[in-house]
Structure formats: C-alpha cells, structure tokens
Amino acid sequence: MVSLPTQFGAEFRRFSLERSKPGRFDEFYGLLQHVHHIPNVELLVGYADVHGDLLPINNDDNYHKAISTASPLLRLFLQRKEEADYTFGTNSLTRKKNTVLSAVLLRPDATRKKPPVIISLPRDFRPVSSIIDVDILPETHRRVRLYKHGQEKPLGFYIRDGSSVRVTPQGLEKVPGIFISRMVPGGLAESTGLLAVNDEVLEVNGIEVVGKSLDQVTDMMIANSHNLIITVKPANQRNNVVRGGGGGGGGGTASGSSGRSSDSGASYYGYSSHGGVGAAAPAPSHIIQNFPVGELESEEEDDEDLVIEVGGEAESAGRDPADYGMPSLPRYEPHLNLRTPSALSVNGAALASGSSGPPSNANSTTPSPDRAAEMRSLEEDGTVITL
Amino acid sequence: MKRFRRHGQESQRERLKQELFQFNKTVEHGFPHQPSALGYSPSLQLLAIGTRSGAIKLYGAPGVEFMGLHDENAAVTQVHFLPQQVELVTLLDDNSLHMWTLKAHTGLSELLEIGRFTLTGPPGAPPSVTRVTAVLAHSSGELLLLGTEGGHVFIVEVPGFRELEERNISLDQVASSVPDNYTCRRNLEHVEALQENPVNPSQVVIGYGRGLMVVWDLKKQRAIQHIPGTQQLESVWWTEDGGYLLSSHNDGSYCRWTMGSKDVDEEDVKSDIPYGHFPCKAISKIVQLSTEEGPPFLLFSGGMPRASYGDRHCITVIHGKTHVALDFTSRIIDFFAIRGGPQHTGDPSALVVLVEEELVVIDLQTEGWPVIQTPYLVPLHSSAITCSHHVSAIPLKLWERVLAAGNMQSTHYSKKPWPITGGQNLGPDPPQRDLLLTGHEDGTVRFWDASGVCLYPSYKLSTAGVFHTDADPNDNMNQGTEGEWPPFRKVGCFDPYSDDPRLGVQKIHLCKYSGYLTVAGTAGQILVLELNDEAAEQTVEAKVVDLLQGQEGFRWKGHTQLDVREEPVLFPPGFQPFALVQCQPPAVVTALTLHSEWKLVAFGTSHGFGLYDYQQKNNVLIKCTLNPSDQLAMEGPLSRVKSIKKSLRQSFRRIRRSRVSLRKHHAGRDLPCISIPHQMEIAPVQRKIEARSSDDSFTGLVRTIYFADTFLADSSHNTPSLWAGTNGGCVFAYMLRLPAAERRADEPVTAQPAKEIQLMHRAPVVGILVLDGHGAPLPEPLEVAHDLARSPDMQGSHHLVVISEEQFKVFGLPKVSAKTKLKLTAMDGSRVRRVGVAWFGSSRSEDYGESGLVVLTNQGDVHVVSLPTVKMQVHYPCVRREDVSGIASCVFTKHGQGFYLISPSEFERFSLSARCLVEPRCLVEAPTDSSTQLTLLFCPPAEVLQEIQKSLEGDHT
C-alpha cells in the first residue's frame, strides 16, 4: 500500500482483493471509483496480463480472468473514458500518459521484490515499422510499413536489379525484378528486422513495380520515404506470418510455405487502376488498409509544407494551422517535430523521467492542470482497502 | 441517377479531351545526324539523304519534306532515284536493297517502302559474291545493275526486284576477254563503278577496283571495249557526248580516256595528278560538266597532297582559268551538280555538297561562286546547342526588325534562289510567327523562324564581343594567302570549337513586345540587350553581384568570371547589350526571367538569386540560398571534370591492380576457379533509398524564377512579386515595390521578403505559376497592354502552382494554404524534367480552349495536366528514356507544341494540340513528260531483251 506522490501528478494506488471472492465487475468498478475518489468519472479499466499485454476489464468474465492471473500483483490501468488513447491487444501495454494507475495487491503481505516491467502504450512509442495487411496478402508476401517521421535515423537500405522466377500459365518464367541489395547497419530498415537482403520488392505504396526500372522504383521509394510501404517477397520464407493466427508470427511457427514458389502475380487481389496515372488521389488510396484510418490521415498531414511568413514566423500549410503550437526558431526543422499534439512538452518530460524513475512506479500525468490539485489531495489519503 | 449523370459528364470530358489533345511527331528540323548517302533526281528536283541509322529523307522546295525509316537498323550506303520516276532505291550496310516510292494519297504524297531485296548467290558461294558495291539505276527505269565485291554484275528488274539471271555479267565472262597484255588481269577485284553511256543506254562501263574498265553492251551481252587502267580505281564519269571517260584513282590522279570502238591505247590517255609532285590522297569522285559556250566544269573531291593537306576535306572546281579548292568543315559524303535547262542538261547552276555536318550549296553561275543559304538542313549545331527558348506569336514589327537585322548579316550569301525546287508545298501558311532561339557554346544566340516546316535561320547574335576572350580577333581562318597552292577557300559554317567555354549561353528570355532580350551564360554573366536597327558603339556597364552575401568558409573552385571590355564596342544592328550583371561566384546561371513592364531581370545560380533593375542599372535584391554545409556547390563545372578524371584514373589503377593480382593468383596456382570469386565481387548496380535531407548537395540551386502581379500579403491588394524555387524544394516569395511610372528612373525599386515555402517532400522546384481568379495563368508582361490578352481576373482569389520534380501543388493566395495536389513520382516513379504552360484550342469549336501544363518526365513521356485542377489529362511516350540529352533539351511552345534534340543537329517537333499542328503537307507528281520519254527510251531495248530471252530459253529447252 504505497502511494507515491509524483511531480507529474501521477496517481498510484495499491489495494488488495480476496482472490477467492472477486465479486462482480460492477462492484469492482464502483470500488475503483471509490478508491480513487472519482465517483462520477467514466473509466476504462485495463490490466497487464502475464505476457505484458494490456487487456480490458469491462465484464464479469474478463474481470475474473484478470483476478485469476494475478501472481500476486495485478496491475490495473485506469483511464478516463473521454481521454482514452490506447487500444488493448498484443504488445499494447506501453508507458502512457493521462492514466490513473492502480495496483491491486491480492496479498497484502506481498513485497515488491519483482518490479513490474514497464510496458508502454503505442501512443508513447513512435512506431518504427509494422507489418500490415496480413489478412489480405498471400502468405509468401509481406507488406512492411516504415515510419520515417523526420527522425535522424536513415531508412538505410539499397535496392538492385535482379531476376525472379514466376509461375505463369505457360510455366516457370524468369522475369526481371527489384531486390533489396544491402542494409545499412543501424538503419531503420535493418532495425525493424522485417526486411532482409535479397527480398524481392513487389510494390511500393501499393503500386506494382513490375516493368519499372531500378531508377523509377528508387524515385518512387524516395518520393514515399516519409511513409514507405513496401510489399516484399522475403528471401527467407520461414518466418512468414501465419494468417488467421492473430498473434505475432513467432519464429517457430512456420507457415509451411517455405517450399512454395511464388505466385503468378505480384498480388492476387489485383489492383484495379494502378496504371491510371490520371488518378489524382493524394494517397495511394487503393491500398487495402487494415490500419486505423487515423494513421492514414496523419500520413496526409505529414505531407504538409512549411510556410514561413516574413520575420520567420512559421506556420504549416495545412488546412488548420492554428492547432499547432509552432515554435518559431527552428525554421528548417523537418516540421514533423513541430507538429506533435499540444501536450507535447508535458509529455516529453514524462517520457524522460519515466525511464529514469523508480521502476515500480508506473506514473502517469493528470488529465488536466486543474485536476492536478484535486488529485494531489487525493493522493494524501491514498489507502489500501482490504475487503 | 446521380451516378448516371456523372458518367455522362465523364464521357463528355473524354470527348473534349480528344478535341483538345492529340500527340504527333510532325517534322524533324535541322541537319540529319551522321548522313551516309546522297541522291538526287533531276527530273523530280528532289534531294535524298540516307543516314547511318537507316533513315531516308527527301527534300525539295522549302516545305517539301519526306522521311522514311528502314526497319533494319543499318546505315544507308547508297541512294539512287530511278530516272524519270518517283521511285528510289536504297542500299543498306547489311546488303539489302529497298524500293521506296512517293505515293499520292488524298492529294498529298507519302514516302513508302514498297519492296526489299537481297541478292542471293549460288549455293556455297562466299558472301562477297553478292555483296553489292556499286549500283546503277539504268535510264530505262526498268533495270538495276548491281556490281558486287566478287566482281560480278547482277541485273535486276525494278520496281519488282526480279533477278534476270541470264543477263548477269559474271567476272569470268569479263576476265576471259581481257587483253593478255593487261598487267592485272589475274585479279580484277570488286566492281567499283558502273556508268551508263549518256548517248547509248545499252552501253555501260564497269570499273573494277584494280583499275580495269570494261564497256559492256547490254544487248549483245559482251564486252566491246577494255580500258586498261592500272591504278586503284575510285570513280568513273562518262562525259555527256559519250566521247570521253574520266576515271579517278587512289593515288590522286585522274585519267581522260578517249572512247572509240576499239580498245584504248596508251596514247589516248591524258593523265594528271592535279596536286601532284608529292604523294596525294585519292580522288574519290570526279565529274565533268560541259557548258554551252566555254570550257567545261571539272569537279572532283579529294586528291590533296597527303602530307601537308591530307586532313582537308576538299572539292576542287576547275572552270577555265578559275581553280578553287573548296575546303569543307567535315568529311565529304557525296556531291552532285544541278544543271539548268528544261531537261536539266544545260550549264551547271549549283554544286550541292553533303558533308558530314552540313549541306553546302554553291552558286556556280555567280562570280566568286558564293554559297546559297539553305532554307532547311541547316546545321543547328554549328556550335553545340546549350539551351533553347521558344517565343510564340511574334508581333509583326519585331519580326520585321529581327529579319532585317538578319538580312544584314547574310550579305555574303548568293542572291540566287534555292535551286532544289521539287514538289509542291500544300501546307497552309503558318497561323502565326514563331521564333525559336537557341543558345550555343560559343556565346551566340541563333534566331530561327520556327513558324512552319522549315526551320529557317533568321538572325544570329554573338555575345562574345562584350568580353575579352582567348581568341585573337585578327585570327581570321577564312582568309587564304595569295598564291597559295592548292587554292583553298573555306566554305560552310560548322565550327564546333568554342573560344572559351565560359561564353556558353545557358538561359535566354525574350520579351516579344518590347524587344528586350536577356541572355545568361556559363560564367554567371547576364546580359540585357535591346533591339536597335542601327549599329552602335557603346560600353557595357558591368555590375558584380555577390551571391554569397558574406557566407564564410566558401572558396569557389571553378572558373573565373569573364573579363569585360572596358572600351566602347561597336555592335552591329540587331540586339545590342547595354547592361551586364556578373554573378560572384561566377557559376552557371540556372534560372532567368525578364519583366519588360517593370524593367527588371531576375536570375539564379547554384548559390542564390538576384533581381536587377535594368532601367537604373542597379541591383535590387540579392538572396543567398546556399546551404552552409554544401561544399559541392563551390566546385565549378570545370573542377568537377577534374575530379571525375581523378576518380577515373583511380578506378583504372584499381582495375590494373586487381588484374595484376589476378595474374599473380593464376601464376601461383594454375586453377581457373580462383578467378571466380573476383568476378563475384563485382557489386551490382544498386541504388540507395534515403529520404531527401536539407543537407543534400545543391539544395540551394535556383531552378526557376517567376514574376507575378498577385496577392501576396493580403487578399485585397495585388502587388508585383518575385518567386524563386530551389533544388531543395524551397520557394521564396518577395514583394516588389515599384515607383510610379514618372519617377521610375529615380526612385529605387525595393523587394521585401514575404513568404518562404518549404515543400515537405523536398523535391526540386522546377516551375512556379500564378493563376488568376478564373484559374487562368497570368498573362505575360505587356501582353494586356498590347491588347493581346484579356486582363487577369483580380476579383477571385489567385492560386499558386508549384511544380516540383515529384508533385504538382496548388496553394491559395495570399495565405499559401494547400488546395490540391497531384503526385507523380510516388505513383509511377517518373520525375518532371521539363514543364511549360500551354493553351489548347479545341479542334472542333473555334472559341473553346483551355490552359494546361505540359510536362516531360525523365521517362520521356509527355503529360498534359489540367489547370487549375491539376488532373492528369493525357500522356504519351515521346522521347526514349535513355536519351537524357534529348529530354533535357525539350522546349514547349505556348500552343502545345514542342521541340527536342534527337541528335546534336536535329530538333524533333511534336504537337500535343489537336488544333495547332505544323507538319509537312506536300505533293510530288511524277515528271510530266516522263511517260513519252520513257517509252521512247526503253521500248526498243525491252523488245530486244525479250527476243534474247526467248532465244535463250529456246537454247535451254
């Protein structure tokens, strides 16, 4: 039963429950509200499971499941519903902001010998890469998205001409193809582990590269470098994502397609109009995207240009430039740096201290400054309630 | 219902597109690259040129042009018109013969290939037996005599290419009748020449390489006379009266043989080595033409003394006491003379010479044999083309003044009209007067009349006079010394040697309304010129502009700036420089524009840009765009060449070293497999995938510069503005304040920075354009004042169009808010190389038209992008993507046409507009008197031939 006052207004409660009699979810929910002195605040409740995944608690079943997994500490994460910014799921438990954290001690005598691993929410981590569209691509292919986001790290790979064997109705046919030829150590591409030398590049941001020259593909990739989505046929087919598995493609779960030769087309779900250069679509909209829509939008915003009025006062050429607090000094900074949400400064501090702070202390910032005072008062009488 | 209506709109738009856009490559201007054969038809008055790439081009009266391309990618080695017909035969390098005809179709003639043929020898014969070395199109128009490397003469019936085997003249037949005393009878070698007796079509002379000439009777099928030449034969000419035969030889001699019925004796020979005493080069072709009164013309090419003038390309013309060795600028391909008179048998009127780099026509009837200016086939590359600029719809006044200035420059040309007049030009008169300006390496700007099919030279401006150059002005190559032998005379204008590469013209801008011209060059020089009808002596005031603006740590490693002549210079009538800006560092000028209404010139280099007021001769603005970490920008083009050389040298060394080590390996262990790892080490061509960064080299290079009267600060007041776009994807906008007209000369012009736009994708900005309230591009300066354009709409909001190599983006003004965009590179990997604004008129309705961007990509495709919606309208493949210099040379007109260099000497003209199309439309009719003449000429022999054939067949059966 520790309450750590933090300079960030993070709130931390520790209390215990009887494992054998967990009760119903709504009772538990009421208890949480009571413990935190926030009776009228709508909450999202989540917990960290044994794998470190952030999973929701919103009904009796998952509540019971959560209690059963406590060993003995169950870490709960609370967040105000209107500010909820994380999703539950695999590897989703990350360091986060604006959350109220509770830790439930199932056994009051448990010591804090094993500090919990700090796992952050996706929002706090800048995504570096992702495998997307697993459900619609052939197993032999992999669509990888690299997020450049104006960071210093180079994309860091090279491509070359080569030839690949395709299965056609006429039989096997050798066709020219584009391959990854080299990875720059420490580069973005290498650090993702999703691309490898000799992977064949099939598409760049949804456009097939068949029939295009090395220089054309180079130019396409560079033009899309801030949000590069490349579809490859990995040279090593043993680590393919198992479709329908939902979980991450583990190294051990081979897809069974390693011996398979490639399919006849670049992708069998066929793009209808990639040849139509006339399409004025601002983004390659015909990518079938399973990714959250918001991501696409942000990609659009990424493409905004920086307009500087006389005297160095900068504003984004976006549709609504007022939203972004624009520091006036770094005129030639890639302006992505300038366009993080308004809470950026607070958040940045939290990030910095979060990593250096006591490991047991998963801290969080208060939702708003005016609530901070209230929270502080709450902290003082933070208690452990034993039922 | 809604969807249905939209569909209807789309199909309507498709229909409209078809009325607006249409892609055609219409005509090739300039001089064919690598010509390899020349032919002429006196009856058609058409000239034919074959090229090494297999093209065949026909030219007649100005505007009459035809072009054909052989499917085989082989050089055309010979072109022969069939006498009195509209057919011609070409011989290619691969030994194939091709029959072409000019077919009239809907009132216009087309050049079509109608047949091809390759000689087939007997089975097992070596290929030399059928390798064609000489072609004679017999005057009957029915026969083709083909002499081969094996010494045989094959006879083929044309136009169908039917071999008349029984009439072939085999080497054995000829050799058996050669007199025993002939020294070289063992080996006659190949057939070098075939000539027909001008007075007896049944007689031909066969000239063998070794020197023997045999007169063969086609009817009797036997040799009737042997001419025992002993020198390696080069060519044969039978004089018109049939009385003499001229042969030219490898040792620079020629012989005149008297023709008779019996074999020629040594006494009948008159031999001469015209440039003798010392060993001479071969006389490759000899022609003698009689005149009605007076001595004949003797023309021959070559024959120069080997040691002293072996490198000259000469044709000697001897007429009576006049003897001139015409000294050409490049290798002579072939020549012929045009003769006067109704049957083209009169006095020679002109000598037409095809040399490798130009066509020269010499007037043989005017004293001094002046050159006749060619209306087409002009060598565009007389000095290498470095840039071009097209100006549409030139006002008549300026046009006349430019032409008048040009006429004063061409006084040394013959007054005689162009002698090649075949065909009729049926094309309509050009709708407007267009000028194409080409900048050259030697600092000249050439003005071409580009209104029609013929690209006609109209005026040449030289900027070199403003500067001190390395060339000695007294060094006049054209003046031959008195009494020199051979009596050389320089002809032709091809002169690829530049006195000073810094003079090279890089950018040109002409204001067609005011006659102001600005020309910028390699050493950062920007000249402002004014059209003056009188010669004037004036000093050109130079203004140095320091574009580095105090940026420290840079040292220019390139060339120095040009030295300006401080004394007054006499400028001939035409464009005369009156102001000069010299950029410091003296890097090549990469962007240039002129606003004649505001009297401002803006320019950019790799270091920054500047604005110059040419009325007050003052700098208004200097802006440094150089990235502080960019050292590469300080290396001039010359130092880069040095570094390339250095790296080449290093790589050669590396190769040598690796070879040495390879050899060592081999010496050590005699295993061939050792070398395999070495081969494997060769890295494949690979490309780095990396986002552009602000630290890249040459981000500060100014790619485009633009003046606009638009809304830069607020939406209620439009002001003059200057826009500049850089290689790093940055656009700078300046607001200009101009004093009122009456105080323009005294009060300063000022420029205030207003906006900077950094494009997120950082691709080079290649074009900037402002659209008015109607979405139409702003008119050119003075265009409205001259009532030639509607004044721009200033009520609606203006839009800024920024064209980068990768995208087209439209921004609202004055806030520069993003409106729409079109991504090019992200979609198909192509990049914008050239861009222009054009107006497309509908081919169906006279009054409808729209503006669009015309774009050429690095893939060689041309696109039309609509304005202001930036939507792709049409795209066509235009230039081969490998043809980098062709793509770089492309220039667009304001009416949807364009030009690009297909070789250093030729512009291809193309059109994207369905309405505005300049293409040759011409008709060539078969010679009117040909039918009667033909029957007279070939009927009797044909009958005889048939008889012979019958008798031969009878013998066989």
Image: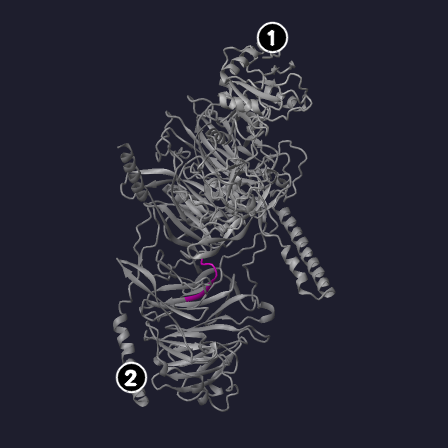
- Give the quadrant of the N terminus of chain B: top left
Q: How is the image coloured?
A: one colour
Which sits in the foreground, A231 or B796? A231
Say if residue B714 shows up in the picture: yes
> Tag 1: residue type?
Ser
Have a look at marks 2 and 1 and say if they share a chain.
no
Residue extending furthest right?
Answer: B668
Using the image, name the chain to which the residue with label 2 belongs.
Answer: B
Residue with the mark numbered 1: A377
The picture places residue B697, in percent across and down from the top left corner, at 60, 39
Q: Nearer the viewer, mark 2 or mark 1?
A: 1
Point out residue B214 in the picture as x, y percentages from the top left corner: 43, 83
Identify residue for label 2. Answer: B944
The answer to whether the residue labelled 2 contacts the one labelled 1, judged by CB atoms less than 8 Å apart, is no
Is residue A58 visible to the viewer in this orientation of the structure? no
Stretch in magenta: B31-38
Outermost residue to the front: A20
In the image, residue B776 lies in the stretch drawn in magenta: no
